[in-house]
Image (cartoon, grey):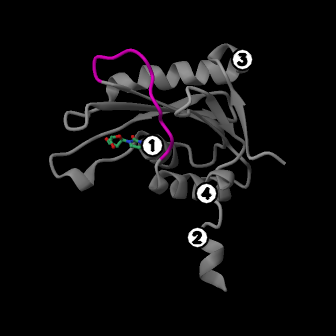
Amino acid sequence: MDLFQSYNSLDDLDTESKYLIHKAKEATQFAYAPYSKFQVGAALLLDDNSVVVGSNQENASYPLCMCAERVGLYSLGNTFPEKKIMKLAVVAHKKNHKELTLAAPCGACRQVLLEYEQRQKAKMEILFLSDQQKWLKYLSAASLLPYSFSADSLIH
Ligand code: THU
């Protein structure tokens, strides 16, 4: 089975995905990114149709910067840990620029996404814009992180 689906334009996506991308775009306004000037927003669609968002939060001590995806995931984990994430969209744009740019989740976020997916025992779709200006819809967090390390690895 394919790991992801590719769409040439936003219009080709389903209504739910378009809505979630819109919510992720809205969330970029809360980014605190004075150092990178790279505004990232993440939106999580939950199994009760509610949406939780996150944006990147930076710090003068650079390694403390936190990605939008993890701000959203940890916010959910801290409020409604029993709700399942059906879909997550992440978008990014440079400060004062409207057009969206590549926003592939970083390696650290893929690791955290995977753990949330395993914890909820259900796949989540992950949407982002690829460098060819194509929207990619990954069908699970696991498919974004092959040969991953997880709790299973600790047991054997
Ligand atoms: N960033 C995210 O928010 N998500 C990612 O997956 C990649 C990077 C943020 C972190 C930092 O504030 C800025 O983008 C530049 O790396």
Residue drawn at point x = 55 percent, y = 26 percent: 133
- Camera-side mark, 4 or 2: 4
- Which image quarter holds the C terminus? bottom right
Q: Which three-letter amino acid code belongs to the residue tagged 4?
A: Leu
Question: Which residue shows up at 48% across the image and 55% down it?
Answer: 107
* Secondary structure of the residue carrying numbered label 3: helix
* Residues shaded magenta: 95-105
Q: Amino acid at mark 1?
A: Ser
Residue 149, numbered label: 2
Circles 1 and 3: CB distance less than 8 Å? no
Question: Along the polypeptide, which appears first: circle 4 or circle 3?
Answer: 3
Q: Which mark is residue 23?
A: none
Real-space CA distance between mark 4 and mark 3, rounded to the nearest whole angstrom: 26 Å
Residue 101 placed where, x, y %? 44, 27
Assess disc 3: are there few (<14), some (14-19) or many (≥20) residues with their C-alpha within 10 Å of its C-alpha: few
Residue that label 3 marks: 12
| Residue assigned mark 1 | 75
Residue type pointed to by label 2: Phe
Q: CA distance from mark 1 to mark 3?
A: 30 Å
Q: Is residue 130 left or right of residue 6?
A: left
Residue lying at 26% horizontally and 33% vertically, measured from the top left: 32
Q: Which residue is located at x 64 percent, y 58 percent? A: 119
Judging by the rendered image, the residue that carries numbered circle 4 is: 145
**N-terminal label among 2 and 3:** 3
